[in-house]
Image (cartoon, rainbow, N blue to C red):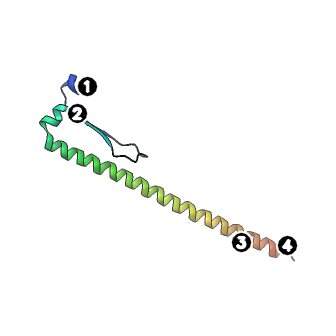
Amino acid sequence: ERMASESNCWVYIAGQHPNARIPFLHFASQRLRLEGPSVLDELHGSADRLFTSLLTSRRQEAAELTDRLLLAQNRINELESEKAAWESSHCEH
């Protein structure tokens, strides 16, 4: 607020932590709120869509990686079982 006031600038700042479960944080200077309320609404909506999109893609990527990891772990278990069965059948002879 002080920076916006001292510089007489229109200021909009938005931020979202990737692991947060709360809406993004934002700040709009008083000048921006007074002189551009309709544009500020559009800007805020764009920031919301941006962060929602980033969080969604991040969660989707994490889900895909988890699925791939589980498939790989299952395959390792299958191969270990096959190896044990093969060793068991070849050690008997």
- Image point (14%, 41%), residue name: 37
Answer few, some or many: residues within 10 Å of disc 4's Cα (few below 14, many 20 plus, some between 14 and 19).
Answer: few
Q: CA distance from mark 1 to mark 2?
A: 9 Å
Q: Amino acid at mark 4?
A: Cys
Q: Residues within 10 Å of mark 3 (few under 14, many from 20)?
A: few
Give how far apart the Cα atoms at labels 4 and 2 are: 76 Å
Amino acid type of disc 3?
A: Glu
Residue nearest the observer in this picture, 87 or 26: 26
Tag 1 near tag 4, CB within 8 Å: no
Disc 1 vs disc 4: which is toward the camera? 1
Report the residue at 30% width, 49% height from top.
50
Tag shown at residue 91: 4
Q: Amino acid at mark 2?
A: Val
Name which of mark 1 and mark 4 comes first in the sequence.
Answer: 1
Badge 3 vs badge 4, beta-carbon distance below 8 Å: no
Query: Does label 3 or label 4 sit earlier along the sequence?
Result: 3
Q: Residues within 10 Å of mark 2 (few under 14, many from 20)?
A: some
Residue 90 % position (x, y): 82, 74
Query: Please, is residue 46 above or below residue 90 in the view?
Result: above
Q: Secondary structure at mark 3?
A: helix
| Disc sitting over residue 3 in the figure | 1
Q: CA distance from mark 1 to mark 3?
A: 67 Å
Query: What residue sits right under mark 2 in the picture?
Result: 11
Q: Which x, y percent locates residue 79?
A: 68, 68
